[in-house]
Image (tube, helix red, strand yellow):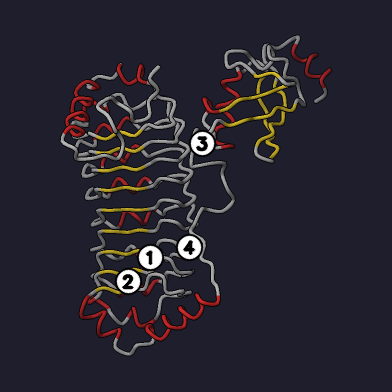
């Protein structure tokens, strides 16, 4: 649509959609937006595309800094305009712009590394290792340069209690993992695993599994079958490319720790409120703009980490109902101290947090008695 066409249509309409381009970090981002939208609206639209919080965005057009309260039309931004986006340091979600690949730990191989790998291979070929695994119940194969889980692992059967194959290059978690029917802990981190690499039918048959750790992989989704792992107490899925959590997570009523930071999660299902054993929830560095009110049902919740999200508010019952909550991380969100003070139960929470600090039980978030968990002072 030409400039003339846009102006002609605007005479009879209060709002006209225009197409603009935003230059950011070497990329050109096409945007379609109504010309009566505010610059603040435009920044909110850019947030999931750039991973930069609105308050960390500076939009420049024809050498001028655009003002949040003004509309696109008032800012003289017309159809076909090109804007520049500058991001303030420390106000990114997820540590920076969305990448095509998840940030997994690279495994580089030098000549010396290959010699070490040969030594590991000799250890792996040890004829007695199966007996050791059966005797201890621990199958420890982390950092062994594996491309597949060795067949001997399946021979452990019900003797295995822990399977640790993190930091390898395993591309297949087969159905036969179900033969480890007494396993309690499974570590699959940092293997570059994709969605199709995990055969969930086998994995979700592990009825005694209490810890599942599949962080630092390339997962984009978690299946509904996850709800079959009813004994699960810890779920670690950090540093993947997840956009959501399955509704069936509400079935995991024994879950105590949920770590899903550094993903691309935009919404949290309301059924998370049914996970009433949750003690710690880590959702930092995602694309969240709100949380479900059912978070207030987590009466055992002690720590909630929400930094580097686009949150503007919290569930209204968070401080009133979550009476065990003592740690709340809101760094680099849109939530201010003025907003927090309006919540019912805020003063009681602040007293619990202060008491915890004074007893020196946790130094992670605060370094003084004043609330400094990410909310702006003004």
Mark found first going from the N terminus, 3 or 1: 3
Q: Quadrant of residue 155?
A: bottom left
Q: Residue at the spot x=72%, y=19% of the render?
A: 77
Q: Residue at the spot x=32%, y=40% of the render?
A: 271
Q: Quadrant of residue 314?
A: top left
What residue does disc 3 label? 92
Q: Is residue 124 above or below residue 335?
A: below
> Gap in Å between the C-alphas at discs 2 and 3?
41 Å
What residue does disc 1 label? 201
Answer with left or right where residue 353 lies relative to residue 281. left
Q: From the viewer's side, name the closer residue of 303 and 293.
A: 303
Of badges 2 and 3, nearer the viewer stands 3
Of badges 2 and 4, nearer the viewer stands 4
Q: From the viewer's side, name the closer residue of 270 and 102.
A: 102
What residue does disc 2 label? 178
Mark found first going from the N terminus, 2 or 4: 2
Q: Quadrant of the C terminus?
A: top left
Mark found first going from the N terminus, 2 or 1: 2
Mark found first going from the N terminus, 4 or 3: 3
- Marks 4,1: beta carbons within 8 A: no
Q: Is residue 146 above or below residue 336?
A: below
**Residue 131 in the image, given as x and y percentages of width and height:** 25, 85
**Residue 114 in the image, given as x and y percentages of width and height:** 51, 78
- Marks 2,1: beta carbons within 8 A: yes
Answer with left or right where residue 282 lies relative to residue 1. left
- Marks 3,1: beta carbons within 8 A: no
- Marks 4,3: beta carbons within 8 A: no
């Amino acid at each position: 649509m030409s400039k003339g066409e846009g102006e002609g249509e605007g005479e009879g309409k209060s709002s006209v959609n225009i197409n603009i381009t935003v230059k950011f970090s070497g990329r050109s981002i096409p945007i379609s937006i109504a010309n009566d939208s505010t610059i603040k609206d435009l920044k909110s639209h850019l947030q999931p595309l750039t991973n930069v919080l609105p308050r960390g965005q500076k939009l420049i057009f024809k050498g001028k800094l655009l003002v949040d309260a003004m509309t696109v039309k008032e800012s003289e931004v017309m159809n076909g305009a090109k804007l520049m986006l500058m991001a303030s340091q420390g106000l990114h979600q997820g540590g920076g712009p969305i990448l095509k690949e998840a940030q997994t730990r690279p495994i580089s191989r030098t000549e010396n590394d290959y010699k070490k790998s040969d030594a590991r291979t000799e250890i792996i070929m040890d004829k007695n290792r199966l007996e050791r695994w059966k005797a201890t119940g621990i199958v420890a194969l982390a950092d062994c340069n594996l491309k597949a889980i060795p067949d001997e692992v399946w021979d452990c059967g019900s003797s295995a209690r822990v399977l640790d194959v993190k930091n390898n290059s395993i591309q297949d978690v087969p159905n036969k993992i179900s033969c480890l029917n007494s396993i309690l802990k499974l570590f699959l981190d940092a293997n570059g695993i994709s969605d199709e690499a995990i055969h969930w039918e086998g994995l979700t048959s592990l009825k005694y599994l209490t810890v599942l750790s599949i962080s630092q992989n390339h997962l984009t989704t978690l299946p509904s079958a996850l709800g079959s792992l009813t004994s699960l107490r810890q779920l670690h899925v950090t540093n993947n490319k997840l956009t959501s959590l399955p509704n069936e997570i509400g079935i995991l009523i024994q879950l105590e720790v949920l770590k899903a930071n550094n993903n691309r999660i935009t919404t949290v299902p309301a059924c998370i409120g049914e996970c009433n054993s949750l003690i710690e929830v880590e959702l930092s560095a995602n694309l969240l703009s709100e949380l479900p009110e059912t978070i207030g049902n987590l009466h055992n919740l002690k720590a909630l980490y929400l930094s580097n999200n686009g949150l503007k508010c919290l569930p209204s019952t968070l401080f009133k109902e979550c009476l065990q909550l003592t740690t709340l991380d809101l760094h680099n969100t849109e939530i201010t101290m003025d907003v927090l003070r309006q919540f019912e139960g805020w003063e009681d929470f602040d007293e619990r947090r202060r008491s915890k600090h004074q007893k020196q039980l946790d130094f992670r978030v605060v370094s003084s008695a004043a609330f400094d968990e990410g909310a702006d002072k003004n």
